[in-house]
Amino acid sequence: MTKITLSVIKADVGSYVGHSCVHPELLKTAEQYLRDKGKAKLVDFVVTHVGDDMELIMTHRKGCDNDEIHKLAWDTFMEATRVARSLKLYGAGQDLLADSFSGNIKGMGPGVAEMEFEERRSEPVIVFMADKTDPGAWNLPLYKIFADPFNTAGLIIDPQMHKGFDFEVHDLIDHKRITFHCPEELYDMLVFIGATGRYCIKSVYSRTLNDIAAASSTQRLNLMAGRYVGKDDPVCIVRCQSGMPAVGEVLEPFAHPHLVAGWMRGSHYGPLMPCSVNHSTPTRFDGPPRVVGLGFQLCEGKLIGPQDFFADTAFDKARHEANVIADYMRSLGPFEPHRQGLDALEYTTMPQVMDRLSGRFEPIE
Ligand code: F6R
Ligand code: MG
Ligand code: MG
């Protein structure tokens, strides 16, 4: 049997009201388009959303970075954009940075997380999707899932996990990558992945199974567009069980909301609130940032599911905690550390204010 590829490709192609949600007509349009045009290319697909981001979860046998699959996703987003424009939805076509497709959707606006693997006897996967934040949001949970024995009991108890995991980390500024072998290089790795605006965990590999365990999207819209175009609202795929972390170990880091960059105008820190698809609509101060976790069992590439994990009442406390943290952070208003530092605001109006006032700054004796 040829390997299966799981591709999660997302874009914000127009939202209602403001930057809060994907209109049902857009989801319907994308679904119909994939059903018609994806018939010969895809094994299966699910169209969903988190906040204002449309998510295409697709399985196929063409491998990662396949131009046919990427073009299919691009054309689906274009089709949905047409509907968004006809309804005068907000920010129609916002994440599509080019007029036409050019071979690989990466670098053109949409976010992409993909992995190719041999489907195991039973293949549970979780697709995480976030709104109002950026790819650095996955560093802390991926670290906990694959490297922290206080989170993942399997690192101690499961003989197939005891050897640890390899982490591929990308430097999004200098476009370089490095692989850390953990647990022995944990402290070295943390020097980098603690800086979530620059270094992002791109993928994780099981050292025992010699196989991919997780993959994330690391596209940074601002860095590509050279101007402020919102945050990147990342996605991440994690394989579970039988030598990979258990489903519950993969969900566990989200029980305590961590602070992520994003929220209002992509310029503030706020708690990442776990929620169901139906509760993924950001409201307060355009947030707080949301994360949805959809579980699937793969069956010869068919997506059996989804299981909307964060709908569970076990995450009620995390939501409450996120609201308490949100309240506290909001009380700081325009001051750091609620507002992001100046270098992170580089792509907002801040440089214009600086330019305008630069002549009025005088040396201090
Ligand atoms: C953040 C986000 C929103 C917008 C805000 C202003 O990622 O999408 O918080 O930045 O609503 O939007 P504009 O500039 O489109 O009025
Ligand atoms: Mg938007
Ligand atoms: Mg969004």
Image (cartoon, rainbow, N blue to C red):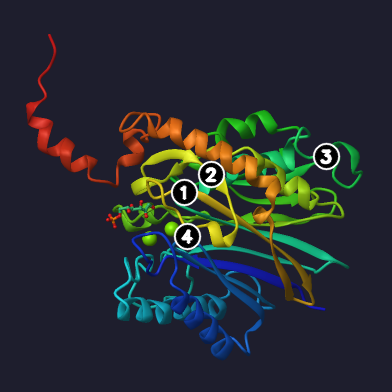
Determine which residue is flagged by label 2. Answer: 272
Determine which residue is flagged by label 3. Answer: 155
The type of residue carrying mark 2 is Leu
The type of residue carrying mark 4 is Gly
Nearer the observer: mark 1 or 3; the answer is 1
Residue at image coords 33%, 61%: 18
Which dot marks residue 282? Answer: none
Q: Position of residue 217 (x, y in %)?
A: 55, 57
Whole-angstrom CA distance, mark 2 to mark 1, is: 8 Å
Element on which disc 2 rests? loop
The type of residue carrying mark 3 is Leu
Determine which residue is flagged by label 1. Answer: 133
Which residue occupies the extreme left position in the image?
359
Residue at image coords 12%, 32%: 358
* Label whose residue precedes the other's in the sequence (3 or 2): 3
Q: Is residue 93 left or right of residue 142?
A: left
* Label whose residue precedes the other's in the sequence (1 or 3): 1
Determine which residue is flagged by label 4. Answer: 51
Picture quarter with ligand 3 = bottom left
Whole-angstrom CA distance, mark 3 to mark 2, is: 25 Å
Ligand 3 within 8 angstroms of badge 4 C-beta? yes
Foreground residue, 196 or 292? 292
Element on which disc 4 rests? loop
Element on which disc 1 rests? loop
Whole-angstrom CA distance, mark 2 to mark 4, is: 13 Å
* Label whose residue precedes the other's in the sequence (1 or 4): 4
Please say whether residue 24 is visible from this viewpoint: yes
Contact, CB < 8 Å: mark 1 with mark 3?
Answer: no
